[in-house]
Amino acid sequence: MDLNFTAEYEDFRADVRAFLDKHKADAPVMANVGLRSEKRLKWQRILLEHGYAARTLPKQYGGFGAEPDSLKQRIIAEEFARAKVPGGIAGQGINMLVPTLLELGTEEQKEKYIAKTLSGEMIWCQGYSEPGAGSDLASLRTAAVVDGDDFVINGQKIWTSTANQADMIFCLVRTEPDAPKHQGISYLLFSMDTPGIEVRPLMTMTGRAEFNEVFFTDVRVPTSQIVGQRGEGWMVANATLTHERGMLGDPDAALSRLNSIAEIMQNEHVDGKSLMDNPVYRDRLVALEAEVYAMKFNGMRLTTASSEKKSAGLAGMIVKLQGCELNHRLAELAIDVMGEYGILFEDSPFLRDHGLWQTHYMFDLGLIIGGGSAQIQKNIISERGLGMPREPKAAKA
Amino acid sequence: MDLNFTAEYEDFRADVRAFLDKHKADAPVMANVGLRSEKRLKWQRILLEHGYAARTLPKQYGGFGAEPDSLKQRIIAEEFARAKVPGGIAGQGINMLVPTLLELGTEEQKEKYIAKTLSGEMIWCQGYSEPGAGSDLASLRTAAVVDGDDFVINGQKIWTSTANQADMIFCLVRTEPDAPKHQGISYLLFSMDTPGIEVRPLMTMTGRAEFNEVFFTDVRVPTSQIVGQRGEGWMVANATLTHERGMLGDPDAALSRLNSIAEIMQNEHVDGKSLMDNPVYRDRLVALEAEVYAMKFNGMRLTTASSEKKSAGLAGMIVKLQGCELNHRLAELAIDVMGEYGILFEDSPFLRDHGLWQTHYMFDLGLIIGGGSAQIQKNIISERGLGMPREPKAAKA
Amino acid sequence: MYFGLSQDQTMLQDSVQRYLESASELEHVRGFAEGDNSLAENLHNGLMELGVPLVLVPEEFGGLGLGVLEAALIQQAMGRFVSPSGFTSAYAMAVIGLREAGDDDQKNDWLGRIAGGSAIIGVGLTEATGAREGAGLTVSGDKVSGRASFVMGAELATHFMLTSSKELLIIARDSAGVSETALTTIDKTRHVVMLDLQDTPCTVLAGDGVAAQARMIDMGRVLLAADSLGAADMMIEKSVAYSKDREQFNRPIGSFQAVKHMCADMVAKLEPCRSLVWYAAYAQDHVSDEAALMSRLAKSHLAEVGKYVARTSTEVHGGMGFTDLLGLHYWFKRIGANRQLLGGPETVREEAAKLQGWS
Amino acid sequence: MYFGLSQDQTMLQDSVQRYLESASELEHVRGFAEGDNSLAENLHNGLMELGVPLVLVPEEFGGLGLGVLEAALIQQAMGRFVSPSGFTSAYAMAVIGLREAGDDDQKNDWLGRIAGGSAIIGVGLTEATGAREGAGLTVSGDKVSGRASFVMGAELATHFMLTSSKELLIIARDSAGVSETALTTIDKTRHVVMLDLQDTPCTVLAGDGVAAQARMIDMGRVLLAADSLGAADMMIEKSVAYSKDREQFNRPIGSFQAVKHMCADMVAKLEPCRSLVWYAAYAQDHVSDEAALMSRLAKSHLAEVGKYVARTSTEVHGGMGFTDLLGLHYWFKRIGANRQLLGGPETVREEAAKLQGWS
């Protein structure tokens, strides 16, 4: 256990700070900025140049070519969070497609797509989930039939974030309808401008359209636009899942949420008494504080494991399940302490904190459900993490 | 909604009170009294005579022959609880065997067993569960093989309360080993004095032996001692489950637990402050109070439904699951408020309330697990109560 | 002893439910949430025809002279269909306020107007359940000034009943000196406003405003609990139906034990709440020494169980529960708003402790 | 930056675990619980040979001069095997008390005796975490009188370190005026006593007793948290093993989703606790401004998660978990006792709030 960084890392931290001091002015503000804004693209260029984006990706494809080092990644995350400056672009193109192409793409695909994606000029969306294929993703039914040199695609995708802004999509389609379900899928790349694609915003309970539905009607895509072979799409898609994210995000995000709640409790008054003077709320706050620190330290443990190239086992597998739940319950406390003011929303007068607690409360529930629901997470923890037996296959009725 | 009783019932209540005033002195104290004590048997005789035990059972077999009336049953329960006087004997013989014999026994069996069981002279134990057959009771393996006029029984039962004091056992055994598991079981009655029976007390986490294990080695039982036909034992055993218990028990038991905790909180002091002055404990107390009342009113709703001969549906199906859980959490609060004194146990000096909160805490957990575990209860609620689909049968490996 | 609903009560609730089932369909609610007030008007007229708003108005003033239990059953039906309706404020709390604190003239006047449909009274008593933002009203003669926050039932209100903490008073919505700020809450099925008053003419009710206001809050809380009960009932039904219909891994998701147990847990927690709400409502009219306590227990307990059901039901619906497509979130948010209105659970439990001398 | 155990720390914990695995088997623990003290003696001797009790004793006094993290790892191993041992009191809290409040002579004397095995010191500081029953000690000259309740580590103690709330003091167990009452708790794997003292000769530690006692409690709580962590780890492992082995309905119960999710939930809650305990222990020696807070967070959080694991694991074991046959209840009760010793979670959280100026 050593919470200090060696001189090498302290020097690196100093470099990051110096960089931030010098270039901070060029950074877009944290709040949403258009994906294609010049400010954002310029910032990405600066980050790429200094190795704060695409840090470990090969130089020949527009990366920085540094050795992987999770401590340095953490220092970058910490310093960017401290300076309240956004890190590099973290869309699904960079996080999921690029690692996939590096591993399984053709040389031509790599050259054509990676650099432009890293620079932020080419925006991707992910076409995986379908209305009938959520937890059971491999049952997807969007069909791609070969006609001459093209696949002709018909079907529908859902939960496609940024589909309305994307240039391209990496998409799972069923090309072998008669094969077993995991073996009939192919992984295709195509332009969102291709005729026959319709994007409809998907409104959620938060009142915003964070996602889209994407409909394909006779969409023609050259057969060369496949990654891997026909029927290998499931394997191609899962290869990405084992890749680690470049940036870990703000390591203290939950802690700053907790601190914001403590601030609300100190500043809001009911019948003249500070909410912090309410021992029941205070007890909940401290109980959550313990969980926040436990998750923070668990995250530090994961960073160390990663820097040692070791698996953190169960400590890593529980992060999504516990992290989303914890964030949800933090928002719940914030709402409760605000009482009737806690239900104000959107653009209401008297709104606290821009209404973000209700948004968190709902969006975090969405995160508990999405990207591998809590139930699926628990199956994975018990079966892969603890080696418990799988459910027996159902007998044919 | 009418919480008053009609004149007929108020008269009945007056009768019960008059009875109690007159005979109370004959009642054994609430605390454990030997199953065979003269005091207990005498009290049972008095109750039978006045219709406060075996109230609705036929006169010819020693019952009182009254019409079923769940309101009167409730009044009896309320008044006995108020007077802190124990009701009639409520062993498994009276609750489970007698209704079974009335429905499916031969005339000879009825005459031989019912009256003596009701009077408390004949004590029964139940031989159902086995170490390998808990939730999946029908997989029981205690074998009974016909040899001449006898069954010869070999195997083991577990969770057999009062086995060490019982005269007789009603027991499920496998007589048809090749039949499907639900169709190979028979229901036998035999004496616990039969050679080859060994009873071993089963110690639990409470530190007491509330149950026993019973071992059978070449136990010979005449084939006439069967209830129903060979292979019908599962049906015979389940027939009993649909019978209602004669006495509903103390309808306000959870409420008196709650009140005891409130008393502890008012009387115990830490650093000179009453525990009731701790707002966090107080908040938990009131939250539990709401649940206690909800369950109490749910119970009143069930009584009404029963008096109207209607099914209460889901309101009835959730009682075991919620009731045990609530009692467990009441005990949990009592322990927490007592702090270090809450972990004192058995005969420790400074023990509070005879240590019953720890005993409750553990025994209630046992009740959550036993007699249809919480998991099995939830399967029943969802499948039978809500009509959700059963799990598909597993394919043969 | 009969613990349950009478035939009349069951029929009343059934008739309201049948009416709302077609009059307050999801698409109507969605329209209302998006700003079209017509559903509130239609429902008001439709319910008026059924006589529903008049349950608590004494017969002598043209009402049905029924009790709080009937009112709770009606509100439960409203919750079931997330129906916009100022019922809790206009036809329950305001009526009780008048019955308790109005003198004969005031009763005649206002209860008559309510029965006739010409007065629809929103209610703002938040200041009596914990004041923030320096809200509070001061009466001077027949004028009132100050701020009333979180005034409920603003959909169609012609008047508002407010509290100066000592007196109950009524103002007309279109009076001089009324400045109204619409509040947007998560719950788009009901309208809440904040009122800033400056020398606004008001009718001060003649009787004991403090006692009347306490009874109004007791009853209002019972009705919010009933509303959450109805909403939670519907969420469970929707969950069960969805779980039978939706397939993953070649089986309905309702055949997975995890999903089954989520549904069973919801039922196990919610079912006893039904009896608690019934009793709390019944106690308002028939068991006066338990009325205040039971109201608080019902309100706080339904806040907790409601939250559990809202969350769990959304999870059972998976991604679809999170989208706007099924509209499940209207129920989720209605329950969320009920939790905080007229006092969050911690506040209400502390009051319950005080009532019992525990605090 | 390295967040995790060093090789030395891992080896230390492994060696203690390996030792306890054979020396503190269930049958030994059962024997101890039934009144045979020999396990405590054997373990004391065995651990002494491994040098384990001396981790916190500075090297100049014959110890190993290691830190609280090492002590926590050792206690975690003890919890894992529900081993009787006064480690937390005799070799952690008492050593810290002497290090913090002893003058040079006292350190020389007592730390030497501890290292040599001639002094085993039980600790009673309950009065500093919330006094009931009018407990409390008063020092007059070199004599002490009064009551010390819930004194821990009584298995083999030759001495006791107690508090008068101002001073830390040591008495010999066999001194004049010591009247000892054994307390029976649910946890039969450890001995707790109540002491009534009447003019008992004592050694008052020369330094700041209040500060020293605070550090002792901080560390004691971390070690109780570590003990619960170890016990909970074992309960989960036992649950998983049992669920693979036990069959119902012709399948291992571990193939039922309900059982799987119970195990996953236990892991998901417990795994982050490991890092919290590590950090809280580390902070005692290396992050002085967080030591008190992290101790309280670890103690209270492990009380909650420990309770959850204890209950859930028992449920996974079904009826067998409820019996004495598998001895699972020793772990259940050990965790239950840890929850209350040195302050229940509500008490400890309120202290944490105070530390941060929240209360």
Image: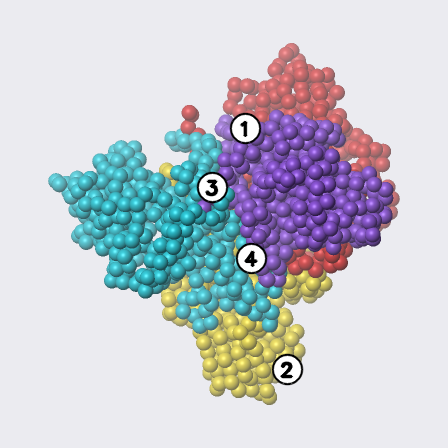
Chain colours: A red, B cyan, C purple, D yellow
**Which residue, given by chain and number where applicable, does mark 1 sit on?**
C246
Q: CA distance from mark 3 to mark 1?
A: 27 Å
Q: Does label 1 lie on the same chain as label 4?
A: no
Residue at position x 17%, y 42% from top?
B108
Numbered disc 4: what chain? Answer: B
Q: Amino acid at mark 3?
A: Ala
Q: Could you confirm whether marks 3 and 1 are on the same chain?
A: no
The residue indicated by pointer 4 is B285
Against B389, residue B289 (above or below) is below
> Horizontal placement of A136 versus B130: left or right?
right
Residue beneath the point at 55% across and 46% down:
C282
Report the residue marked by disc 2: D206
The residue wearing badge 3 is: B315
The answer to whether marks 4 and 2 sit on the same chain is no
- Crowding at label 1, few (<14), some or many (≥20) Cα neighbours within 10 Å? some
Q: Nearer the viewer, mark 3 or mark 1?
A: 3
Whether labels 4 and 3 belong to a single chain: the reply is yes
